[in-house]
Amino acid sequence: MKKSLKTFIIILAVVIVIGLCIGGYFIWRHNDMYIGKNAAIDIALEDAGLSRSLVFDIGAEFEKSHGHAWYDVDFQDHSMEYDYVINAVDGSILSSSAQPD
């Protein structure tokens, strides 16, 4: 009985270590492949001619579908609401819009 418990614990530990390694690889790969949320926000703000201190409700969401990845970046200043779609790989602006608040 004790030997089978020891074997189970060893197998469980090995599975956990392998899972952590695989998870770490995908996190590393994600960080290495994409520009990141902060860079996407900076690109959108620069295009709008605004600084972080002049805007509020800043948000950026990473999205991926069919081999394409992008960030949806939204923010507002006191008169306009901005919406940007930023390519997550190269930082190019895929679309942008500004509407009165």
Image (cartoon, rainbow, N blue to C red):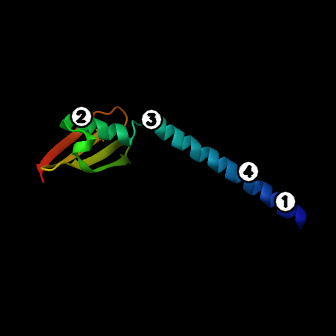
Give the percent coordinates (x, y) of residue 71: 33, 44
Residue tagged 3: 33
Question: Type of residue at label 3?
Answer: Met
Residue tagged 1: 6
**Cα separation between marks 3 and 2:** 22 Å
Q: How dense is the environment of label 4, judged by Cα within 10 Å: few (below 14), some, or many (20 and up)? A: few
Q: What residue is shown at x 40% (from left), y 39% (from top)?
A: 36
Foreground pick, 50 / 44: 50
Q: How dense is the environment of label 2, judged by Cα within 10 Å: few (below 14), some, or many (20 and up)? A: few
Q: Secondary structure at mark 2?
A: helix
**Cα separation between marks 1 and 3:** 41 Å
Residue tagged 2: 46
Left or right, residue 11 beside residue 64: right
**Cα separation between marks 4 and 1:** 12 Å
Residue tagged 4: 14
Q: Earlier in the sequence, mark 4 or mark 3?
A: 4
**Residue 90 can be seen, yes or no:** yes
Direction left: furthest residue:
100
Q: What residue is shown at x 36% (from left), y 48% (from top)?
A: 63
Give the percent coordinates (x, y) of residue 78: 15, 50
Q: Which quarter shows the N terminus? A: bottom right
Q: Earlier in the sequence, mark 4 or mark 1?
A: 1
Q: Secondary structure at mark 3?
A: helix
Q: How dense is the environment of label 3, judged by Cα within 10 Å: few (below 14), some, or many (20 and up)? A: few
**Cα separation between marks 2 and 4:** 48 Å
**Residue 87 can be seen, yes or no:** no
Q: Which quarter shows the C terminus? A: bottom left
The quadrant in which residue 52 appears is top left
**Cα separation between marks 4 and 3:** 28 Å
